[in-house]
Amino acid sequence: MTVTLITGANKSLGFQTARELVAQGHIVYVGARDPEKGRRAADELGAKAVQLDVTDADSIRAAAEQLQREQGRLDVLVNNAGIPGHVNSAGVPGHPSTATELTAETLREVFETNVFGAAQVLHEFLPLLTKSDHPVVVNVSSGLGSIAAVPRGEERAIPSWIPVPGYAASKAALNMLTAQFAYLLPDLRINTVDPGYTATDFNGHRGTQTVEEGAAIIVQAATVGKDGPTGQFLSVHGPVAW
């Protein structure tokens, strides 16, 4: 059976992805910062729980040791845990009221989870992934991390685009890490995905998609075949511009 770990899987997109992969016969580990929330989610899904805080190196290492003891390998890693970053005066996550609100500290906070956390998780679990006959990594990104999609000049009035500099920069960095690891680890199928604007706690449920719709590309990338794409930025509609 395929052994899968999903970070930040006790709710929203991570939870739905876990649900669908369990239904496909995967042994799914629900990674969650709060062990009680992770246990409840795992019990509901018929999955296994592992305490995992992507900003805590000791927590990541302990999670890797648990999977080593219980499974001896990891087939699929889904780096789903992420934060929007700064919450503005209107209560909108990830969205500064003005450009002057963006500081190195606000950037550091979001990069700690969305970039450094994902990188550290991959680092700690890579030895277990190399024991798989078909190792797969999915980095959950966002269309807001596409530099090509940033409105310029007369395009600034595009209503569907949201200026979230910290979050967007972190996802652009995650995209580049994905491309670099795909080059360095050719035996791995590693892709970054854009779930689309999905209604979750992450955006105050302002999204226009259901979690089922958002999770579709994550599940698709998690179940890619040995000859499937790697080093790609993907959505359900196809490749996303970098």
Image: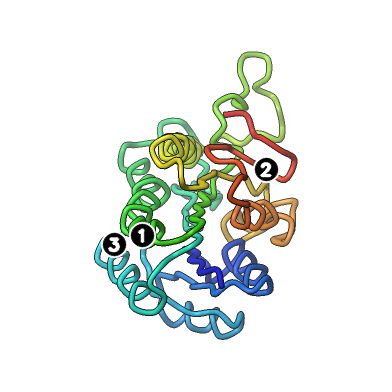
Q: Position of residue 187 (x, y in %)?
A: 46, 46
Looking at the image, can residue 84 be seen?
Answer: yes
Disc 3: CA contacts within 10 A as few (<14), some (14-19) or many (>=20): some
Q: Residue at x 64, y 72 (%)?
A: 19
Left or right: 65, with 200 as reference point: left
Mark 3 vs 1, N-terminal side: 3
Are the two marked residues, 2 and 1, in contact with CB atoms closer than 8 angstroms?
no
What is the quadrant of the N terminus in the image?
A: bottom right
Disc 2: CA contacts within 10 A as few (<14), some (14-19) or many (>=20): many
The amino acid pointed to by label 1 is Phe
Q: Which sits in the foreground, 139 or 108?
A: 139
User: Which one is in front in this view, the residue at disc 3 or the one at disc 1?
Assistant: 1
Q: Position of residue 168 (x, y in %)?
A: 50, 37
Disc 3 and disc 1: Cα gap in Å? Answer: 14 Å
Per the rendering, the mark at residue 109 is none
Colour logic: rainbow
As drawn, 143 above or below 18: above
User: Residue lying furthest front in this view?
Assistant: 133
The amino acid pointed to by label 2 is Ser
Are the two marked residues, 2 and 3, in contact with CB atoms closer than 8 angstroms?
no
Per the rendering, the mark at residue 56 is 3
Mark 2 vs 3, N-terminal side: 3
Q: Residue at x 49, y 46 (%)?
A: 88
Question: Disc 1 marks which residue?
Answer: 125
Disc 2 and disc 3: Cα gap in Å? Answer: 30 Å
Q: Residue at x 41, y 40 (%)?
A: 181
Residue 51 in which image quadrant: bottom left
Residue 242 in which image quadrant: top right
The amino acid pointed to by label 3 is Asp
Q: Residue at x 33, y 78 (%)?
A: 69
As drawn, 6 above or below 214: below
